[in-house]
Amino acid sequence: MKHTLYVLLQNKPGVLSRVTGLFSGRGFNIKSICAAETIDEDVSCLTLVTEGDENIIEQITKQLHKLIDVIKVHDISDGDYVEREMVLIRVKAEAHTRAEVLRVIDIFRGKVVDVSARSYAVEVTGSPSKIQAAIDILRPIGIKEIIRTGTIAISRAGKNK
Amino acid sequence: MTDLTGAQAVVQCLREEGVTTIFGYPGGAVIDLYDELMNSDDLLHVLVRHEQAAVHAADGYARVTGEVGVALLTSGPGATNGVTGIATAYLDSIPIVILTGQVPTPLIGNDAFQEVDIVGITRPCTKHNFLVNRKEELVQVMREAFHIARTGRPGPVLVDLPKDLIKSIVPFPERKAIKMQNYQPTYEPHPVQVDKACRLIMKARKPVLYVGGGVILSNASEELRALALKLDIPVTMTLMGLGAFPGTHELSMGMLGMHGTYTANMAVAQCDLLISVGARFDDRVTGTLDTFAPNAEIIHIDIDPTSISKNVKVDVPIVSDCRMALTAMASWFDREPDVSVNYEKSKHQEWFAQIRTWMEEHPLTYANDESDIIKPQYVIEMLDQMTNGEAIITTEVGQHQMWAAQFYRYNHPRHFLTSGGLGTMGYGFPAAIGAKMAMPDKIVIDIAGDASIQMNIQELATARQYNCPVKIAILNNRFLGMVRQWQELFYEKRYASTVMDVAPDFVKLAEAYDAVGLRATKKSEVEAVIKEALATDNTVVMDFSISREEGVFPMVPAGKSTTEMLLV
C-alpha cells in the first residue's frame, strides 16, 4: 500500500543522502521524494511516498527516526490529508491541435508557461491522479517531455494533531 | 572562551571525555594532530601497523571498559583501511569515535592527493558521522560525537577533520550538558509495558530468558541474574551475550542458534514465553523464522525501536535500557500484592527438570579419544581450566570462534570479545591489544585460526612496541576451517580455496618479531605450552596443530529450523 511520509530534517549537507541511502541500503522503495526548506531555514521538510505492508512502513518510520539528523517522521496517510503535485508538460501544438491543447489545459485548470511555433509547455497542479489524467488525455496529441515534481502533502487541520 | 589551534582543541576535547589511550596511524592530513600529541604526556597514543587494527583495538578497549574507544587515522587510504573496523563496531553496537584527517577544505571535492569522501563511505556503517566544515563547529562536533557514541544504542561515530581547520585557531567554548533536540534515546521503560510483561511471566510455565549483547552494553548483568534467580528462569545467550549471565550457573543453557547447545535450541523451540533482553533475533540465532519459538509469547526489551518486530513479531515490546527494564520487572514482582515469588518459582520446576534432562542427554561434547591428536575443543577447555575461566578472550572468526564460545565458560560480562555481527576475520588480535592496554592486570588471550590470524599478524610489532603481553592461541588445521566445514557438509567435500597448506612457521614468525613462539603437535604437549605461555611476560604465539577436519557441532544448517541440529 502507498504511504505518504512527512519528514522534518536538519537542513545540513548530506542529510538527504542519509535518507536515500537508508532506503537503498535496506531495500525500501521510494516512489517520489520532494525536499525543500521550511519556514525555519535550519530545517527542511521532505515529502516521501513509499510502498509496503504495515511491517515495512513501521520499519521505514523507525529507521528514519533513528537517523540523528531526522527531527520528526509522520505518516500523514494515517489520517485525512491533501496531496498535490505539479507537472510541466511540453506538448506538440501544431495548427490543427493548438486549440485542442488549450481546451484540455483549461479543463484541468492548467496554464501555458512557454509557447513556440510547434509546442506549448503547460503547467498542471493537483492530486497525483489528476496529473495522471491530464497526461493521459494529452498523450494522443503528442507529449514531447514531462517533468513531475513528485508529491507534497499536508494533513488537514484538526484531524491529526 | 579561549582560543586554541584546532589540534589543541581536539586533544583538549579528548581529555574532557576522559580519554587516556588512543590507537592510530599518522599521515599527511593528521600530522598537526600528531605534533600536538607529542605535547600531551597524559594521552598514550598506540601506534598500530595497519589502520584496521587501530579501529579494532579501540573497539576492544571499549568492550572491556565500557568507555568510548578512540582511533585516529589519516585521510584517504588511512580512512578506508579503517572501514572494516568501523563496520565491525557498528554491527556490534560498540561505542568508538574515529577521527580521520581530511584534505584542506578548499581542496575537498577536487580528487586531491589522499582525498576520499569518508563521510559518504561510512554513512551506512556509523551511528552518525560528521565532516567539520567550520572552525566554530569543531568543539561542539567533538562533544556531540562522544555523546552520540556512548548514549542510546551505542555505536561508532566518525569525525572528519580537514587539515586547514586543524591548523587554524578555533574558539573553545565552555563545556555544557549536551542537548540534541533531534536525538533523545528512550531509557526508561513504560510502566504499562512492564506490567504487561510481568503478567505474561506469571502466566508462563516454560519461560526462557534469551539475552544478547545489549545486557553487556547496558551493564545489566547483575539485574539479569537477580531476575533469573528470583523466578528460576533458565537463560540462553547469543554469541554477543556470552558472559552476561554466568556460564557455570545451573540456570545457564549456554549459547543458542546455529552452533548453540541442544538444550538452548530445544528450550526455545518448546518454551511458552521468550523474554528477549538486548538481543535482535539475528538469522544465526533464529534459523527459519516460522519455526522459531513457535509456541511462545514474546517479550522484547531493546533500547533501539528498530530492533523490535524487525524479524519476529513480538507480543510485548519494551523500548528501554535493559538494566532499567530488568530492575523495573524485578521490583514489580516485589511490589505486586498478590504475587508470591516462591509460587512463581515453583511453577517453573517441571520445565527446569526437562531442561536438566536435555543437558544430561545432549551436553556439549566432542570425540576426545585416547590418541595424541590435539582436539581444538580440548585446547579451549585447557585454556579455561588454566585461567580459571577468568581471562579476557578475544577471537577471530570461524570454527575457533565457535569452539571458544562453546568450551570456555564465561562467568563475567566484558570478558568475551568477538565480531558477532559482521564476522570480521582479523578482529581478535588487535582487539586483544586494545583490551590488554585497558586492563593490564588481566590475562588476555586471542583464540585464533591459522587463516584469521594472518589477516592482522603485523600487529605483533605493536604488541612488542608497547610490551603488551597478549597471548595468541592458534588452532591450526591448515584450512579455512568454517568454510571447509560447509564444503564438507553441503558441497560434497569440494574444498575450493580453503586449503591453507602454505603458511608461515608461526613460531619462527613470532621470533622474528621478538615475541615468543611455542608449538604443540601432540595432546600431551598442550598443557605445558599453555603453562609456559601464561608464565611468559611477553607476547606469545601458541601454535596448536589440531585434528584437521574437526567440525563445529551442534550445527543448524543455514535456512533450517533450530531443532534440526546436526549433533556430533
Image: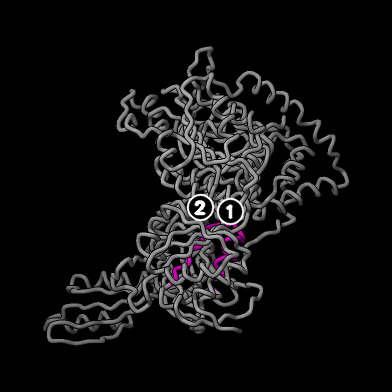
The kind of secondary structure element at disc 2 is helix
Q: On screen, B381 above or below B278? A: above
**Dot 2 crowding, Cα within 10 Å, few <14, some 14–19, many 20+:** many
Position of the N terminus of chain B, as image quadrant, is bottom right
The answer to whether marks 1 and 2 sit on the same chain is: yes
Which tag is nearer the camera, tag 1 or tag 2?
1
- Residue B438 placed where, x, y %? 60, 52
Q: Is residue B544 left or right of residue B390?
A: left
Q: Is residue B285 above or below residue A147?
A: above
**Residue B498 on image: x %, y %:** 34, 31
Residue B32 image-quadrant placement: bottom left
x 51%, y 73%: residue: A8
The stretch of residues the image draws in magenta is: B141-161
* Residue furthest top as drawn: B370
Please tell me how crowded label 1 is: few (under 14), some (14-19), or many (20+) other residues with Cα within 10 Å.
many
**Residue pictured at 62% horizontal, 62% vertical:** B185
The chain carrying label 2 is B
The stretch drawn in magenta includes residue B18? no
- Chain identity of mark 1: B
Q: Nearer the viewer, residue B27 or B518?
A: B518
Task: Tell me, for residue B62, which label it has, or none.
Answer: 1
Q: Is residue B138 above or below residue B231?
A: below
Identity of the amino acid at label 2?
A: Ala
Closer to the chain start, of discs 1 and 2, is 1
- Residue type pointed to by label 1: Ala
Q: Nearer the viewer, residue B220 or B367?
A: B367
Position in image of residue B376 (x %, y %): 50, 26
Residue B305, by quadrant, is bottom right
Q: Nearer the viewer, residue B297 or B128?
A: B128
Residue wearing tag 2:
B89
Q: CA–CA distance between discs 1 and 2?
A: 10 Å
